[in-house]
């Protein structure tokens, strides 16, 4: 694995560590201000990855798929960050603290609506990460050094198209509510 690939792994681990620290300090130690500090570190992790990726490319590295994945990571982190923290928060409260209701598995119209929201987040992530990839390709102005970034952008666009089709299918053939399921 190259330099950037290791940093992506480190940043993903750091993201979840600061989320767990934030939840632990909020609910176990009752330190709300300290938990906000930990949650505020999540964009700092993204900025660190952006700085490291930019520096690597600025110093003449040929872009790799890992550089493209760094842009995806940042786009996803920005677009999904709040919902990921909310997801982790509800599970922490139920499974660790044994408080609140069990997180429900959505069905029917609620499931479809939730998937539509996630698709919109995916589009936002694509716009953020794709813009970063496009800007890097534009600034480097060397197709030989950036061809893997363009490949990542094409694959991500294909994945987004598949996600769009799958989400549309949930509106055409929604998951049945438990009460209306046969069998």
Image (cartoon, rainbow, N blue to C red):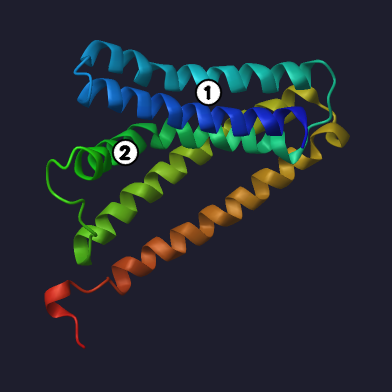
Closest to the observer, 171 or 23? 23
Name the quadrant containing residue 57: top right
Work out which quarter of the rendered image holds the N terminus and state it.
top right
Q: Considering only order in the chain, which callout, 1 or 2, is on the residue closer to the N terminus? A: 1
Number of residues whose C-alpha sits closer than 10 Å to that of mark 1, classed few (under 14), some (14–19) or many (20 or more): many
Name the quadrant containing residue 95: top left
Relative image position of residue 119 (x, y in whole percent): 40, 50
- The residue drawn where x is 66% and y is 26% is 135
Is the residue 94 above or below the residue 110 in the image? above
Query: Does residue 177 appear left or right of residue 140 in this picture?
Result: left
Q: Residue furthest bottom?
A: 183
Relative image position of residue 74 (x, y in whole percent): 53, 30
Task: Identify the element where label 1 is drawn.
Answer: helix
Name the quadrant containing residue 164: bottom left
Q: Is residue 43 visible?
A: yes
Closest to the observer, 28 or 179? 28
- Cα distance, mark 2 to mark 1? 19 Å
- The residue drawn where x is 37% and y is 18% is 38
- Tell me the number on the disc at residue 88: 2
**Residue marked by disc 1:** 46
- The residue drawn where x is 63% and y is 16% is 51
């Amino acid at each position: 694995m190259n330099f950037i690939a290791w940093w992506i792994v480190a940043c993903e681990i750091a993201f979840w560590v600061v989320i767990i620290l934030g939840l632990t300090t909020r609910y176990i130690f009752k330190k709300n201000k300290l938990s906000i500090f930990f949650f505020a570190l999540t964009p700092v992790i993204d900025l660190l990855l952006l700085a490291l990726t930019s520096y690597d490319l600025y110093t003449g590295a040929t872009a790799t798929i890992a550089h493209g994945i760094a842009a995806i990571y940042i786009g996803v982190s920005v677009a999904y960050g709040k919902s990921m923290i909310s997801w982790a928060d509800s599970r922490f409260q139920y499974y660790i603290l044994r408080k609140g209701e069990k997180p429900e598995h959505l069905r029917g119209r609620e499931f479809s609506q939730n998937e539509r929201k996630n698709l919109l987040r995916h589009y936002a992530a694509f716009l953020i990460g794709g813009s970063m990839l496009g800007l890097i390709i534009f600034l480097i102005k060397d197709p030989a050094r950036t061809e893997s970034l363009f490949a990542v952008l094409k694959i991500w666009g294909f994945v987004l198209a598949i996600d769009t089709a799958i989400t549309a299918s949930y509106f055409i053939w929604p998951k049945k509510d438990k009460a209306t399921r046969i069998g």
